[in-house]
Amino acid sequence: MPLHLEVITPEQRVYEDDVDMVIAPGSEGYLGILPHHAPLLTALGPGEFRVKKGGVEETLAVFGGFMDVRGDRVVVLTDAAEPAEEIDAERARQARERAEETLAQAATLSAADEARARAALQRALVRIRVSERRRRRPT
Ligand code: ATP
């Protein structure tokens, strides 16, 4: 019995399929979910959401949200989930560079601007990791 996974954002159903395993960026660390997992409701942090199916692995970048595991059904509700193949690695590297340049002047930044730059840096790092994982994967 596989897991039935749905990843839903306000705009669309990003992913829906029967899968073998999910590795999710829980707010307290990464969590592996196999069929027959105990019921679980957890917040997600920014990170790599990995989906394994038939020996193939797909990765989505997620930036928060919630995951509900009930029976063999996994529902992820999140503001944004980006499949690896939709991520522009060069754009993410430029975003990382901009955020790092901003943070290098932390002493002159307001707390709000610093928090914004840190969040932008975190998004960029997740996107870079997800796009690199895709490149490493044998096709
Ligand atoms: P940037 O500074 O490059 O715009 P950002 O982190 O500020 O990045 P977001 O506000 O998180 O961007 O996202 C705005 C929109 O741009 C979203 O639809 C998001 O999916 C898309 N997006 C952001 N970065 C990338 C990327 N590297 N590749 C593909 N789409 C991206």
Image (cartoon, rainbow, N blue to C red):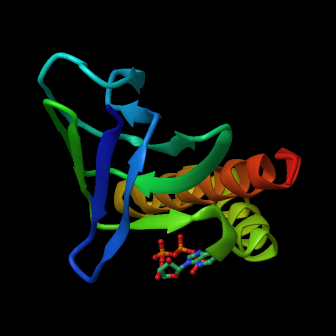
The residue depicted at 85 percent of the width and 54 percent of the height is 139
The number of discs equals: 0
Left-right relation of 20 to 12 = right
Q: Position of residue 68 (x, y in %)?
A: 16, 39
Question: Where 89 sits versus 60, above or below?
Answer: below
Image quarter for residue 95? bottom right
Q: Nearer the viewer, residue 61 or 46?
A: 61
The residue depicted at 34 percent of the width and 21 percent of the height is 28
The residue depicted at 29 percent of the width and 46 percent of the height is 4
Q: Position of residue 64 (x, y in %)?
A: 32, 50
Q: Nearer the viewer, residue 1 or 50?
A: 1
Left-right relation of 117 to 64 = right
| Residue lying furthest bottom | 11
Left-right relation of 27 to 77 = right
| Residue lying furthest front | 1
Q: Position of residue 103 (x, y in %)?
A: 63, 54
Left-right relation of 67 to 22 = left
